[in-house]
């Protein structure tokens, strides 16, 4: 057994000398947060890279979710997915909104549009889908439902940095989309996040909201919060943006090798690329069919651990299994058979730029040896 651990991901880091140069400029200026020049530069650079008209930077990927709900004045009930990181639903709870869970599509693991309408009540005000693993939701169908019932749509696009559908950013779908720039993401600013929306007026409102609601020194327009990104992380983000294309390409190569290696292993399902989509390869989930493969998901998960391969069971347990949510009627697993099945069969394999051929071979050997 080798000592080196292979973790589920490893952060994309900027060149340290280049980062030091930018730090020196921040030190000289003594302007370290509150909409500084690197912050402005990063917002402009991200709009261009992501092909979106407006963006507001945040200090993480959870606060934009919370601020989007505030900005759109969402109340009552919101339809969402149980198959996500818990921050998605926590943002609703913190706003006093009741999550209504709807089952997912087995192909994409995203909210199943066929199941949304049955969950709408007079209290429903919005839909909050997630582009899980960066795979695009069926935004056309979700928008059609939202339009019919007069609902807002906020996409949790934490995993979907740089994802495009037919050359257009997935982030332009719905009323707003949120991003996470956490260390574990395709593009990171250490901690960080952003909110994407369509017009200038909303930019003003969001920028007030993330700065306690201040419109000027003496005017508070809303009960805002402190969600600001600082200059150090904005500078780091500018440097990482220069290498994110290379990182996505590197991840694609890892995905290609995984798919080749897993093709002949019975009982292991992988997600294929979708036609017309620019994927970002943010995660590489595999789904284990115990009967065909001959081992349960957890048996394989712990075998991998013994081999020092630290895959992760994203997203197990389902959000609906956590104590905060499990008492809700829509959290009953009877209503969520697909989500339960996916959560019980998934392992996300290590996926990052810089994962070596040796690492990939070792991971594939480990999975092969379980058969
Ligand atoms: N919505 C969705 C759909 C999300 O997935 C997330 C976050 C959010 C909203 C909220 O965004 P943020 O507020 O977090 O920006 C991680 C992340 O903390 C979290 O950002 C992410 N989703 C979630 C899916 O995964 P953990 O607890 O699994 O991370 P952790 O610390 O165990 O790290 C995983 C592995 O990454 C480590 O084993 C090694 C590697 N790693 C991690 C860190 C932090 C490093 O090599 N270096 C590092 O600095 O939650």
Image (cartoon, helix red, strand yellow):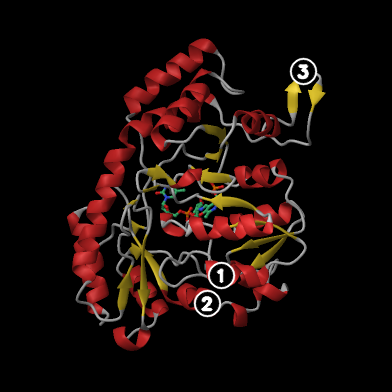
Q: CA–CA distance between discs 3 and 1?
A: 44 Å
Between 343 and 215, the residue placed more toward the observer is: 215
Residue 141 x/y as whole percent: 52, 60
Find residue 340 and name its label: 2
Specify whether 239 is left or right of 213.
left
Q: Is residue 101 above or below residue 341?
A: above
Of residue 84 and residue 206, the one placed in the foreground of this image is: 206
Q: Earlier in the sequence, mark 1 or mark 2?
A: 1
Disc sitting over residue 255 in the figure: none
Residue 106 lies, in percent from the top left, at: 44, 73
Q: Which residue is mark 1?
A: 318
Q: Are marks 1 and 2 in contact (CB under 8 Å)?
A: yes
Q: Earlier in the sequence, mark 3 or mark 1?
A: 3
Badge 1, how many Cα within 10 Å: few under 14, some, many 20+? many
Compared with 15, 105 (above or below) is below
The quadrant in which the N terminus is found is bottom left
Q: Which residue is mark 3?
A: 217
Instruction: Please report the residue visible at 30 percent of the width from the left and 60 percent of the height from the top.
Output: 273
**Where residue 3 sits in the image (x, y, percent)?**
28, 60
Q: Is residue 356 above or below residue 323?
A: above
Circle 3 — which element? loop
């Amino acid at each position: 057994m080798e000592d080196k651990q292979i973790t589920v991901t490893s952060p994309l880091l900027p060149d340290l000398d280049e980062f030091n140069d930018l730090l020196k400029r921040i030190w000289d200026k003594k302007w370290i947060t509150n909409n500084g020049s690197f912050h402005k530069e990063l917002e402009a650079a991200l709009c261009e890279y992501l092909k979106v008209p407006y963006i507001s930077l945040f200090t993480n990927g959870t606060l934009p979710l919370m601020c989007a709900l505030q900005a759109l004045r969402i109340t009552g009930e919101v339809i969402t997915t149980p198959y996500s990181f818990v921050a998605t639903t926590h943002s609703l709870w913190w706003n006093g909104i009741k999550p209504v869970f709807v089952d997912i599509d087995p192909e994409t693991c995203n909210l199943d549009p066929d199941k949304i309408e049955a969950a709408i009540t007079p209290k429903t005000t919005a839909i909050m889908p997630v582009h899980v693993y960066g795979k695009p939701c069926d935004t056309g169908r979700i928008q059609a439902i939202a339009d019919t019932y007069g609902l807002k749509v906020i996409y949790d696009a934490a995993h979907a940095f740089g994802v495009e559908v037919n050359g257009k950013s997935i982030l332009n779908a719905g009323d707003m989309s949120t991003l996470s720039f956490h260390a574990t993401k395709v593009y990171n600013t250490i901690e960080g996040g952003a909110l994407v929306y369509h017009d200038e007026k909303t930019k003003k409102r969001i920028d007030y909201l993330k700065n306690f609601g201040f419109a000027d020194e003496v005017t508070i327009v809303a009960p805002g919060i402190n969600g600001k990104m600082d200059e150090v992380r904005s500078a780091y983000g500018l440097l990482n943006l220069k290498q994110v294309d290379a990182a996505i390409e590197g991840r694609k190569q890892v995905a290609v090798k995984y798919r080749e290696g897993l093709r002949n292993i019975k009982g292991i399902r992988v997600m294929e690329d979708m036609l017309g989509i620019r994927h970002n390869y943010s995660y590489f989930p595999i789904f284990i069919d115990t009967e065909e493969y001959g081992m349960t998901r957890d048996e394989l998960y712990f075998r991998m651990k013994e081999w020092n391969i630290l895959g992760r069971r994203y997203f197990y347990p389902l959000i609906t299994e956590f104590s905060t949510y499990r008492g809700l009627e829509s959290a009953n697993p009877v209503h969520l058979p697909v989500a339960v099945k996916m959560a019980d069969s998934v392992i996300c394999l290590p996926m990052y730029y810089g994962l070596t051929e040796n690492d990939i071979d070792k991971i594939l050997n480990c999975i092969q040896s379980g058969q």
